[in-house]
Image: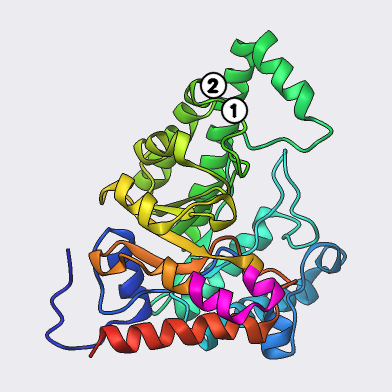
Amino acid sequence: MGDDRRGEEMTAKERARIAMEGGKPDGLPTMEIVFELERELTGRAYVLGKDLEPLRGSERERALNENAELYIRCARELGYSSITVHPAPTPWYIPGNNYYPTLEDELHVVRRIFREAGDELYVAAGIDGTYAIPDGSGFEAFVWALADRPGEMKREARSRAEWAAEQMKRLIDAGAEIMYCCSDYCFNQGPFLSPAMFEEFIFPYLAYQTEELKKAGAYVIKHTDGNILPILEMLIAAGPHVLHSIDPVAGMSMREVRKKADGRIALMGNVDSTKLQTGDIPGIMESCRAAVEGSEAGGTVFSTCNSVFSGIGLEHYRVMLDFWKQHNKGAKQ
């Protein structure tokens, strides 16, 4: 799959579209689920969480509009194909302090970005209603509930997926064209549920959620860290356009996952975030080379295996971006 542009260079958004559809653009697109180094890059920070909550009226609107401008600035400076807007809380998850207090806040920012930059960049957002690895305090109770009350847990799983899909459809209507579904399923050793239990308690609801988002017109990117090999076939069968992480910390290699996926899903990730965090420059370069292995076949989005979180040095991340620029320069020659 490709795109006949008669020698004309593609836009970042076009590259992402072709790659997410499994094709081969004129260079690898790059984007991240989260970029948290906005202050280091621009000298400004997003107004989120408890800093945004007390603002009212025009003051709140101004903060939201300035956030939208900052997302666009960061994406342009980094060469991204998409802008990821921070989420609002869900009934089962509040993402630290990096959140919009209400969905209406998030929708405002999505609309603003889409209006200002939707022709050149994708707007990305998303949540995930499927069960994820519980935190340590709730793990035992969750597992016992699956064993003791399976019917109730399946009804809850369905309810969560339906709720999440409806919230994400509102984001799609506002202009978001990529939906990230970020429930983590796997440890480094493998999934937190056996493949049989995953098939019973997660797979049907992931497939439902994915199909609803695709019907609403979004590209769907499924994220999970860890060793995904025992459930890889179900992740593919659930139908997302892209699978993200391909976590090298858990021993995942782009080569192996690409071979097993056999062109049925696009792949995103695999650059080791721990190397970026520690500043291991040779390790970063080695990880970048591994992440692009086989990318000539198409269906590849270049990114970290997790996110660009606040513990990563911007200068180390620039090493990764410099590799990406050189790789794309070579691809176009």
Instruction: Note whether 197 is above or below 2 in the view shown.
Output: above
Crowding near pointer 1: few (<14 within 10 Å), some, many (20+)?
some
Along the horizontal axis of the image, is 3 left or right of 191? left
Q: Give the range drawn in magenta.
A: 275-287
The answer to whether mark 1 and mark 2 are in CB contact below 8 A is yes
Foreground: 320 or 179? Answer: 320
Residue at 42% from the left image edge and 45% from the top image edge: 213
Which residue type carries mark 1?
Leu
Residue at 80% from the left image edge and 61% from the top image edge: 97
Determine the image quadrant of residue 306. bottom right
Q: Main secondary structure of the magenta part?
A: helix
Q: Position of residue 134 (x, y in %)?
A: 72, 35
Q: Position of residue 200 (x, y in %)?
A: 50, 20
Foreground: 93 or 103? Answer: 93
Crowding near pointer 2: few (<14 within 10 Å), some, many (20+)?
few
Residue holding disc 2:
197
The C terminus is located in which quarter? bottom left
Q: Where is residue 217 in the image (x, y as percent from the top left)?
A: 36, 52
Along the horizontal axis of the image, is 2 left or right of 111? left
Instruction: Note whether 112 is above or below 163 in the view shown.
Output: below
Q: What label does residue 78 carry, if any?
A: none
Along the horizontal axis of the image, is 86 left or right of 301? right
Is residue 200 part of the magenta span, yes or no? no
Q: Is mark 2 on a helix, strand or loop?
A: helix
Residue 263 appears in the figure? yes
Residue holding disc 1:
193
The N terminus is located in which quarter? bottom left
Q: Where is residue 263 in the image (x, y as percent from the top left)?
A: 26, 51
Residue 114 appears in the figure? no
Is residue 281 part of the magenta span, yes or no? yes
Which residue type carries mark 2?
Met
